[in-house]
Amino acid sequence: MKKSSKGLVLAIILALAIPVFAGFAAVNSAIAADATARTLDEIKESGKIIIGVFSDKAPFGYVDANGDYQGYDVYFANRIGEDLGVEIEYVSVEPASRVEYLKTGKVDIILANFTVTPERAESVDFALPYMKVALGVVSPNSALITDVEQLNGKTLIVAKGTTAETYFTENHPEVKLLKFDQYTETFNALLDGRGDAFSTDNTEVLAWALQNEGFTVGIESLGSLDTIAPAVQKGNTELLEWLNEEIKALGEENFFHANYAETLSPVYGDAVSPDSLVIEGGVIE
């Protein structure tokens, strides 16, 4: 066969193969995007529930020196596993990956300091809340930020996919944002001076400032007062209803105040009132 004929045959084969490969890619993409959440019975039958938590956001979700997950969210997750009668597989998530991990079925529940917003509620289903939260801003004492106007012309550190990123992007576009995927990176950037201040949940920046001398939360409450709640894949009604009933039942035993005393009180001490953060039984008083 002449070289020109071989080239023509190869071109035909490639032309036929490309749509096939493209079709496989599209199908695989659709499967990943539309992965069906596990039912409550499937979770129980497997003997395991998969819960997404933070691994670097003490005191809410972090990995301790022994490699074990700890924190306020983890304390709650452990009780969920106990009451379902299953083991827990923890999956470390980043702020921007929380919605995706539910959509793709990588986790059954997200318990990663997940603030309820209308935008997120379009993509996932939130259960009843268990904590109150607003935004806060922490900065060095040597150049303390006490008002948003002081951030004009300065660099504010935020984590991608957080309410802080959304709030400042929409309300204060004049503020330069330095964005990172992980909370560890955000705090390191504040410590080494790459940014002038850092904004995230006020509960988190306050906890960090109490443990890092030379830094203060100059803005303690910014934006609206929001709630934090567990989230499941959109349409996973059975697991959502179970979670809601679980939160109501735990409220009757004052579970979340006990959680606070165990995981948060050692950090906050007298600086924070438990009632300013804790929601029992999913009811905001």
Image (cartoon, rainbow, N blue to C red):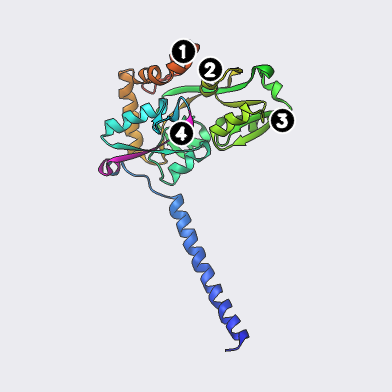
Nearer-N-terminus badge (4/2): 4
When the figure is inspected, residue 227 is found, relative to residue 26, above or below; the finding is above
User: In the rendered view of the protein, which quadrant contains the C terminus?
Assistant: top left
Query: Is residue 176 something that shows in the picture?
Result: yes
User: Label 1 vs label 2: CA separation?
Assistant: 9 Å
User: In the rendered view of the protein, which quadrant contains the N terminus?
Assistant: bottom right
Give the percent coordinates (x, y) of residue 242.
31, 33
Residue type for callout 1? Gly
* Residue at which label 3 appears: 174
Q: In the rendered view, does 83 fall on the left or right side of 102? A: left
Circle 3 or circle 2, nearest the eye: 2
Per the rendered image, the range of residues in magenta is 43-57
Whether the residues at callouts 4 and 1 have beta carbons within 8 Å, the answer is no
Whether the residues at callouts 1 and 2 have beta carbons within 8 Å, the answer is yes
Residue 210: mark: 2
Instruction: Classify mark 1: helix, strand or loop.
Output: helix
User: Are there few (<14), some (14-19), or many (20+) residues within 10 Å of tag 3?
Assistant: few
Residue 269: mark: 1
